[in-house]
Image (spheres, grey):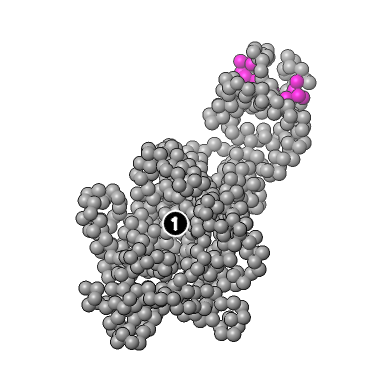
């Protein structure tokens, strides 16, 4: 680094970066820097202007890039690059580091000389990692279709819950919210409002539950068509949070909190406008006038990173050897909550393929997420692998809208240059034109997203750390901060199937009119009749069926809602009966109810051919003793 930079006698009117027009490596990166500096500096080849600056030897132009300031100061090589990039506010740290950080200048110049001597290799590596376009990526397409996909997922979530809400938490449901909230208030007093920030404090009637669900449906449709997207997302978050807290254990699944966290962060990504410029994006459609907020995009990409990484790491740190010896899928297909018929067939695949599938899952969840931050082609490979994994999971198991939501987050890894490369004509030109223009951000939304990053990033970092070190205690300040935001479900940890379930015990509820002849209640989706094939209900989630799977993993005392289910069946609640596939007592409720415990397992191919059964089961014991309304009351 020279103490006194060279000065030219005939400086340009604005900063000028001079480069070798015959260097393909330079050509690619100049296009990127041209976008980053947005017209604040000029770019020209030395072949065009070398004669205008006789103070600079032609050999110097051939050796390295040259940057000339309007005052005549001239810089070369890595320093020239850094001085030019300081006209982009987010890159000023490079020039500052060159001047003030010990060793930074020397390492930078050494790296520059190495690349300059191997330009062809550098060009090939650039093309391999970025493709033909290395300009800063834009995400107009991703923003538009991600928000529409999120609207569709919200729609699915609200409709799915709407058809069950009365039976689950209505006044005659399994866990009535109009009894739950008063009990919470009696215990915690006025602090109950901050512990459970739900609109149901104002009204917990069945009608209000229907209002929240129907309102969510309307707001989801508005988001899909692009009407007031940011305001719709705010209201959707409030409505779904209210239902999650009112839904108690029936809405405590990871995809519920994932939808809330995604929905909350998407508020800062959505444009603040009322009417859409167009419903869909076709070749002649207008390009949005407002840039995609980089802080908001970072928040959602980091959510995807956290979701995938934690899901993989917790499996490896759980102490369950089935993940390390790759045998987890020997159990998973038949022990998971609600398998599909494709899961039955997947269970029949060779052992080596199951072991390979476990390894593939662990790689995609534990290693691939790091490529979210990589150059374009590695990022696209990561998106493809994660989407493929979600499709396979959705094919073999019913995980409601979880897979769709993860795929929607993966859309944010696809930048406009990728879309442009797949399109022709007007759309290609519009996307490229948009990519070269600076667009104004919505300032308030951008600064709000930055504030969210500042508050949540330390918490998220510690959540990820706890996936590696599960027994680590939280620092006091972080624990307090997490407790405040966790109430609203906007910062969460993830990790499905930390420990693989290696058996399948099912609860079969039976009723009797006389205490001698017992008839089973058949659920819509969970295993019961061994002759019934596993069904496919996703993206709908039958929440009572799911909770029955969890209940079988514990005791009746650990699942107090089960007592509410028994009471409602004994009383013949029509709301609860609608959650079932078959009520053996349609006219008059039974006098007695009991619950039996069975061990279930997929049949083999041979057993299925011989009997037609999809399951085989063995009676174990009584789960709940015979009960009647007189005994309960």
Q: Is residue 627 above or below residue 381?
A: below
Residue annotated with mark 1: 254
Q: What stretch is highlighted in magenta?
A: 60-74
Residue 390 visible in the displayed image: yes
Q: Can you give x and y, in whole percent of width and height, for residue 78 in the image?
A: 67, 25
Residue at the image position 48 percent from the left and 50 percent from the top: 277
Q: Can you give x and y, in whole percent of width and height, for residue 163 in the image?
A: 37, 69
Q: Which residue lies furthest to the front in this view?
A: 621
Label 1 packing within 10 angstroms: few (<14), some (14-19), many (20+): some
Residue 227 visible in the displayed image: no
Q: With 117 as the anchor, is 603 left or right in this view? A: left
Residue at the image position 53 percent from the left and 70 percent from the top: 334
Q: Quadrant of residue 116?
A: top right
Is residue 236 located in the magenta-colored stretch of the structure?
A: no
Viewport quadrant of the C terminus: bottom left
Question: Tag 1's secondary structure?
Answer: helix
Q: Which of 108 and 163 is in front in this view?
A: 108
Q: Which of 121 and 26 is in front in this view?
A: 121
Tally the marks.
Answer: 1
Residue at the image position 55 percent from the left and 66 percent from the top: 331
Residue at the image position 45 percent from the left and 57 percent from the top: 255
Q: In this view, does 379 lie above or below 560?
A: above
Q: With 98 as the anchor, is 214 left or right in this view? A: left
Q: Nearer the viewer, residue 73 or 280?
A: 73
Viewport quadrant of the N terminus: top right
Q: Can you give x and y, in whole percent of width and height, for residue 200 in the image?
A: 28, 57
Q: Can you give x and y, in whole percent of width and height, for residue 351 in the image?
A: 64, 66
Is residue 62 located in the magenta-colored stretch of the structure?
A: yes
Q: In this view, does 275 lie above or below 105?
A: below
Q: With 577 as the anchor, is 114 left or right in this view? A: right
């Amino acid at each position: 680094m020279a103490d006194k930079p060279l000065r030219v006698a005939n400086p340009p009117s604005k900063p000028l970066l001079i480069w070798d027009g015959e260097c393909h490596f330079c050509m690619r990166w100049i296009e990127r820097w041209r976008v980053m500096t947005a017209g604040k500096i000029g770019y020209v080849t030395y072949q065009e202007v070398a004669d205008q600056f006789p103070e600079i030897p032609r050999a110097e132009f051939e050796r390295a890039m040259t940057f000339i300031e309007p005052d005549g100061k001239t810089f070369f090589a890595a320093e020239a690059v850094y001085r030019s990039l300081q006209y982009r506010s987010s890159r000023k740290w490079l020039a500052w580091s060159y001047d003030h950080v010990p060793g930074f200048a020397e390492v930078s110049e050494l790296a520059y000389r190495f690349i300059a001597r191997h330009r062809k290799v550098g060009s090939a590596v650039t093309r391999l990692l970025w493709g033909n376009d290395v300009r800063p990526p834009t995400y107009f397409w991703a923003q538009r279709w991600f928000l529409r996909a999120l609207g569709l997922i919200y729609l699915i979530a609200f409709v799915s819950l709407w058809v069950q809400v009365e039976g689950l938490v209505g006044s005659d449901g399994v866990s009535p919210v109009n009894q739950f909230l008063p009990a919470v208030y009696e215990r915690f007093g006025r602090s109950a409002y901050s512990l459970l920030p739900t609109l149901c404090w104002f009204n917990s009637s069945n009608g209000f539950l229907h209002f929240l669900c129907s309102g969510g449906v309307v707001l989801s449709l508005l988001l899909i068509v692009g009407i007031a997207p940011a305001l719709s997302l705010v209201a959707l978050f409030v409505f779904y949070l209210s239902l999650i807290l009112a839904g108690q254990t029936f809405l405590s699944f990871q995809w519920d909190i994932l939808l809330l966290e995604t929905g909350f962060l998407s508020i800062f990504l959505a444009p603040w406008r009322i009417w859409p410029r167009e419903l869909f994006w076709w070749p002649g459609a207008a390009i949005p006038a407002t840039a995609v907020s980089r802080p908001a995009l970072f928040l959602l990409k980091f959510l995807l990173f956290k979701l995938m990484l934690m899901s993989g790491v917790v499996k490896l740190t759980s102490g369950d050897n089935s993940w390390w010896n790759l045998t987890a899928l020997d159990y998973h297909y038949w022990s998971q909550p609600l398998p599909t018929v494709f899961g039955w067939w997947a269970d029949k695949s060779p052992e080596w393929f199951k072991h390979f599938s476990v390894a593939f899952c662990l790689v995609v969840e534990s290693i691939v997420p790091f490529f979210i931050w990589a150059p374009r082609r590695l990022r696209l490979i990561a998106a493809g692998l994660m989407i493929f994994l979600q499709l396979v999971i959705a094919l073999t198991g019913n995980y409601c809208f979880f897979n769709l939501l993860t795929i929607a987050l993966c859309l944010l890894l696809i930048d406009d240059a990728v879309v442009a490369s797949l399109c022709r004509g007007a759309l290609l030109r519009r996307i490229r034109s948009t990519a070269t223009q600076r667009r104004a951000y919505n300032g308030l939304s951008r600064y709000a997203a930055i504030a969210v990053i500042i508050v949540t990033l330390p918490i998220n970092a510690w959540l990820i750390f706890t996936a590696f070190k599960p027994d680590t205690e939280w620092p006091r300040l972080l624990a307090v901060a997490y407790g405040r935001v966790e109430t609203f479900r906007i910062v969460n940890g993830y990790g499905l199937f930390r420990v693989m379930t290696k058996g399948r015990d099912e609860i079969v509820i039976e009723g009797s009119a006389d205490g001698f002849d017992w008839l089973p209640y058949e659920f819509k989706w969970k295993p019961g009749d061994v002759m019934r094939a596993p069904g496919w209900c996703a993206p709908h989630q039958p929440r009572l069926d799911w909770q029955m799977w969890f209940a079988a993993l514990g005791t009746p005392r650990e699942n107090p809602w089960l007592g509410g289910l028994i009471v409602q069946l004994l009383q013949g609640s029509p709301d609860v009966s609608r959650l079932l596939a078959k009520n053996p007592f349609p006219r008059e409720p039974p006098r007695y109810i009991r619950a039996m415990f069975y061990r279930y397992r997929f049949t083999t191919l041979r057993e299925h051919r011989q009997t037609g059964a999809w399951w085989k089961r063995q009676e174990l014991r009584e789960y709940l003793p015979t009960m009647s309304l007189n005994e309960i009351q």
